[in-house]
Image (spheres, rainbow, N blue to C red):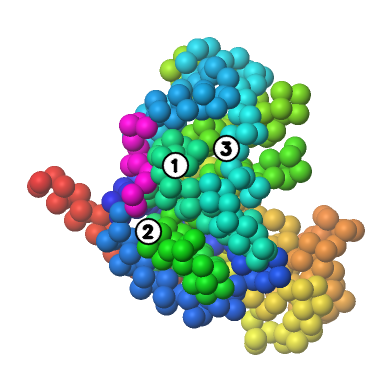
Amino acid sequence: MAEASRTFHATLFSLPTFSPRFHFKLSYSHSHPSLHLKRARSVQRSISETKTMSLNTTLPWGCDIDSLENAEALQNWLSDSGLPPQKVGINKVEMGKRGLVALKKINRGEKILFVPPSLLISSDSDWSSPVAGHVLKQQNVADLPLLATYLISEANLQKSSRWSNYISSLPREPYSLLHWTRSELDRYLKASQIRLRAIERIADITGTFDDLRRRIFSKHPHLFPKEVFNLVTFRWSFGILLSRLVYLYSMDGKVALVPWADMLNHSREVETYLNYDKSSQAVVFTTDRAYQPGEQVFISYGKKSNAELLLSYGFVPKQGTNLNDSVELPLSLKISDKCYKQKLKALMKHGLSVSQCYPIQISGWPLELMAYAYLTVSPPSMSKQFEEMAAMASNESIIRKDLRYPEIEEKAVQFILDSCESSISKYSKFLKKLKRRLRDMRSGELRA
């Protein structure tokens, strides 16, 4: 995938080394809490199938990710469907992406968009094929797989679906890591645990699809033909959902696709987000800065690390600009520690294990990490404090938030620094090879 190479090339050294705290889980139905038991079986399949399917299959719906060809049709359809006159319009923005740009001056504190509920796509949306929707709901399929199947069903109907203009504006290949090939994941993310998270996510989605296929699709082939409902289309629909779904707090936590609003790009410099406004009975956002005509209008996708942004949205901000960025630092008790058993017992009592990962941000590290470091370096003479250190390391302590042990603080900080250096050293060879490869790529481009 060319886009994977371009995105990674532009942001090489802003990629995090460790996985984010966000953990993606899928449920097949409300009665089947998790598909993680199926992961071992489906990881290999997802690896082999995604290699071939993504390279050889072109979806008959959607458009190129940077295309404006369907923008006018989308805006006309939205207007005809109840969207009021807008102060923003779709245009190309930096790096050839699409975004919403101010058509006239927008003041700070102004509400814009006003997308009516009738234009939201959620788990209770009406199906163009009501029988298919009824079958899925009878089986108590959870919201996310239900929405993924709904999107494929409506996309396949093309002009017969009321959502055809919207679906025509969606990218055939979202930026999501779900659409990176396995070789790209191995090549560009080899030094990062985000690679494993991406493979895990693909495996979860594959497991969900396998369950739906076995329990429902195979039993109703006239409603869910395999030529349409397959792993390629399922991965596409999940890529759309994971990068575009909006959590609407004011609609009792409804999760929905919001056509038009989902054209907004993310900026770390704004904190405003989409929500349902009860007074106007529409999805809006309130600007926290002014925009002049021609300026791109932004929202916030949330305070996410670079890893989270890459995993779901397929991009990372410029190096050093994301103040919410973090990397996960693995820490571990040494089995040679004289108090190993006592410390492990204290950790386990508070739900922790011998090895833990804690986030480190540009602004520093959390108190929990420092508490774990204190516990690791503490001598036998401090055994009475093991319990409170473990409680603090698990964030269960509600008393001594200023937990400090001056006599071992230097050792604790040194332990953290040593752990950082150990983690960095594991990737030095990879980075050298990657720099060499990128130099060769640049040389090839110059010769061409």
Give the residue at mark 2. Answer: 180
Give the amino acid at mark 2.
Trp
At 55% from the left edge and 69% from the top edge, which residue is drawn?
216
Earlier residue among tags 1 and 3: 1
- Residue 409: image quadrant is bottom right
Give the residue at mark 1. Answer: 160
Circle 1: element type = helix
Name the side, left or right, on which 221 lies relative to 363: left
Q: Position of residue 68 (x, y in %)?
A: 35, 31
Most extreme residue toward the right is 399
Give the amino acid at mark 3.
Val
Q: Tag on residue 118?
A: none
Foreground: 14 or 20?
20
Q: Position of residue 36 (x, y in %)?
A: 59, 74
Q: Which residues are magenta?
A: 59-70
Give the residue at mark 3. Answer: 258
